[in-house]
Image (tube, rainbow, N blue to C red):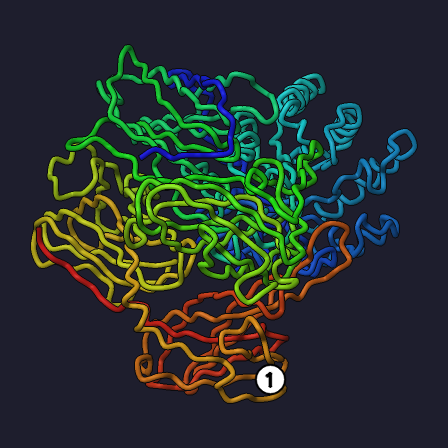
Amino acid sequence: MPLQSTGASAAPVETLRVDLSDSTGAFYGGATGILYGLGDQGVPSRDLIAGMRPRTVAQKPPDGEQHPSGDALVTADEFFSSGGTDIYINSQDIYSRWPYQDLGIDDYISRLRPQLEKVAARPDRDRFVWTIFNEPDWIWYGDWATKKDKFLADWTKVYRTVKSVLPNARIDGPGEANYNPGRLRDFLAYAAANDVLPDIVTWHELSPDSLNHYRAHFADYRELERSLGIGPLPVNITEYSNRRDTSVPGQMIQWITMLEDTKVDAQMAYWTVAGNLSDHSARTARPNGGWWLAKWYADLSGDTVRVTPPRPSTRDSLQGLATLDRDDAKATVLLGGTASEVEVAVSGLAESTFGRSVDVRVSKATWSGYEGDAQQPPVVAASRVDVVDGVVTVDVPGGDPLAAYQVLITPAGHGAAPVANAPWSAQYEAEAGLVENARVVSQHDQSGWKYTTSGGSDVGYMNNAGSRVTVDVDVPRSGTYELGVLYGNGGFVGQQALYVDDAHVRTLTYPAVLNWTYRGRLDVPITLTAGKHRLSLRTSGPNGHLGAAGDNTLDRIDLTEVTGPETAAYPLADARRSDGAVIERGVRDAAVLAPTAVALGATDSVTAYVSAKQDGYYTLSTTWTGAGPSRIGVTTSGRRVAGGDLVTDRAGVWDGSVTVHLKAGVTAVGLTNESRGRVVLGALTQVRAGDADARAAVVEAESGRLGGGAVVQAGVWASGGSYVGQLGNGGTVTVPRAEAVRAAGQYNLTVGYAQAEKNTGHAYNTDTITRFLETTEAGGGTTRAPYRHNYTWDGFWPETSPLDLTTEGGELTFGNATGWGPNVDWISLAPLVVAKSVTPR
C-alpha cells in the first residue's frame, strides 16, 4: 500500500535524468567523512561506524584540551578496524579555548611535538593526516594584508617540524573557514616555491549557499592549480553542512551528491556532540534516518554516471547521484530534497547487462529526528518493467522534502515480481492541528544555524494545565498502530497525556534530549478502529496537571500500521560480501527465497546490517542450497555465536534459523561458509521473538550489595522508585546470578543507566563525557563498557553490551576502577542464543 503523507502541499512532478552509459569515473565514497564523529571506544558502536563506512574522520590530538572526548589515538583502532582509511588530527585542538589562545608559534610547536612523537610510535603512523592550522583566515591570521607573511613563515616552521619527526607524514592545508581564492593563490604559490606544499588541499563549506557555489569553487581551485603548475592535489572539504542538514536525509543527499561528483573527501561538521557520527546516530548504537542514507551511499559500487537534476547547484532542491556496477548488474540512484513526486528517467540500460526487463525497488529513508532511531527503510514502490530502447522510468512518491530515496534496478529475476513492503503510514504536523494554550513557533532559518523542524514550525510553550495539540486522523483498518511523536525538551524527562476521541489512553514519557529543537522520537503502540479519530497530546491527564514535565515541544505526529511482530528481510545480494562471494542471478529453485542470491565459496562471507527496535530476542533465518554437507557460521557484531552454526550432513535445500539476543539498533550479522563446497543463500529474515525475552534475568540495582561509596537514591523515573548512584571511584554494587543465567557462556548485558556529565565552556559544542562501567565476575574476568551522556542524571536509557562469563554462577560486581560510572537503575543478563533450527526443504 502506498505511503500516505499529510500536511504537505501538492507539488508538480519533477524529472531526474540518469544516463547509465555516461560514466563520470569510479565511485569514490569520500563524502561522508566526519569531524569528531567518534567520541570514545564504543561510542558510537562499531556496527554503526562500519555500516556508514566513513573514509576519513577528524579528531583531536592526543591529550588535546579543546574537547573532553574524540582523542585520535583512543578512537583509531576501532575506526581502522571498521573500514576507515585516514584520521585527520586537528593539532591546534591541543588548546582549551575557542577560538584558540594565541600564545605564539613557539608555544604551539612545543605542544605539537608530543603529538607527533605519540603517533610516530604507532606502526600505522602513515594513516594519520596532520591539520596543522584550522581556519587561519579568522583565527590568528585574519587580516591577510598584515598577517600574510607571518602565516607563511609560521606554516613553514610548523610544516618542517612535522616532517622532522614524521618524514612521510601527510599534511593538509590551508584549512580555511571559507573558499578564499586570493589567499589560496598566495599560499600555494609560496608553498610550491619553498617546498612546503600540502599533500591535501582543504577548506570549509559551511553556508547553506555552498549548495549553490561549491562546484564553482572546486572548478576554480582546479584552474588555480593549473595556472600555478601544481597538482592536481587531493582535496578534502574538512567541514561541511549545517545544523539543519545533519541527520536529515533530504538535506544530506544534496551535499553528498556534489561532493561525490567532484571525487573529494569531505567531513561533516561537528555542531552538537562528539561520538554521534555528526548527528547520524541516536544513542550509542541506533541509526536515525540520516544514517540509512549514509549507509546507502557506502554500499555504492562501480562507476558513477551522469545525473541531471532540474536545477543543478541549487540549494534545497531535487538532487541525486547514481552508480552502475556492471559486475553485479545493478544500477543505484540516490535522490531527495524535494516535496514533489519525482520521475527518474533512466537511460543507457544495456541489454547485455540488464536483459529486456528489470526489477525496480524504491526505498524511503524518512527523517526520524536527531535522537530518534529509524529501522530499515521500507520499500515504498516496486515493479518489474520492460526496458524499451535502453530506457525505464521510475516513479518516486513525493510529499516529504526531508526524505531521501534509493532506487535499485537489477535484471528481472525468476518467479514473482518484487513488491513494496511499506505499511500504511501518515504524518501530521503538530502546528497544523488544533493548538490550545500553546504557541506555534516558526523555526525557518536561512542561515542553517537552527536544527531542522519538520514542516518548518513546531508547537512550544506547552507550560500550563490547558496546553494541548489535537490532530484529526483517518485510519484504513481496525488494529494496532505505532504512534511516533517527534518532540523536544530542555534536557529532562517529559510527559504528556494521550487522548483518543477525548478518552485518556495512556501517559507518554519522553526521554530527555539535548534541547527544545534537537528532536527525539517516541514510538508507542495504540489501538484504533477503522475511520476517523481525534488524537490529542495534553499537559494534563486524569490526575491533573503533569507540571513541568509536560512542557515539551511537539513537531510531528506519525501513525504507522502494525500487522504482526517486528519483521524485516535483508536480500543478501544487497549485503556486503567478501571478495570471493558473487551474486548469482537466475536461481530457479523457488526454495531460495530471493530472485537474486549470493554464492559463497569456502571461507567466503556476507554481512547484513540488521536493525532492531528493542533490546531482546530475534529469530534470524535464511535459506540456502549446498552441493554437499554445509556449515554456516554466524556472527553478531563480529562476535562468533557459539552454538549458532547452521550445519547439514548432505546436499540439498535447507532452512536454518537461530534465535539470538540483539541490542536495540544496528547489528552486523555475518554469515560465513565454513563448508568445503559452495553454498548459495537468498535472504536473511529477522523476526521479533518476544516470548523468548523471559529467558533474560532482570534485577533492580538497588537490591544488590553496595560497596565503597555507592548509595541508593530515590528517582521518580527509576523503575523501582530508586537507583544506585556514586558508582565508580570505589563505589560498587554486586548482584547474584539467577538460576537461569548461572551457566558459563555468552550473554548480553543490558543496563538501565543515566549520566549527564559534560564540560560547559565551549562556544557551541556540547562537550559530553562518556562514563564507563566495569563488570567483574567472581572467579572470572572484568569487562568494560561505555555509557554515553544521555542528557539527565535520573532518566534511564537501556544500553546493551556483550559479556562472556566463564564460571558457574559467579556473582557480578559493577563499578569503575578509574573514574565515575553512570547511575544504574536495573541490570539484565540474557543468554546470547536460546534456539536453533535446521530443516530440509
325 left or right of 430?
A: left
830 left or right of 823?
A: left
Residue 637: image x %, image y %? 39, 58
614 left or right of 38?
A: left
Q: Nearer the viewer, residue 176 or 485?
A: 485
Residue 629: image x %, image y %? 11, 55
Count of marks overlaid on the render: 1
Residue 692 can be seen, yes or no = yes
Residue 359, compared with residue 370, is above or below; it is above
Residue 545, compared with residue 56, is above or below; it is below
Residue 511: image x %, image y %? 55, 60
Residue 117 can be seen, yes or no = no
Q: Quadrant of residue 43?
A: bottom right
Outermost residue toward the right? 146
Residue type for callout 1: Ala
147 left or right of 127?
A: right
Q: Which residue is mark 1?
A: 710
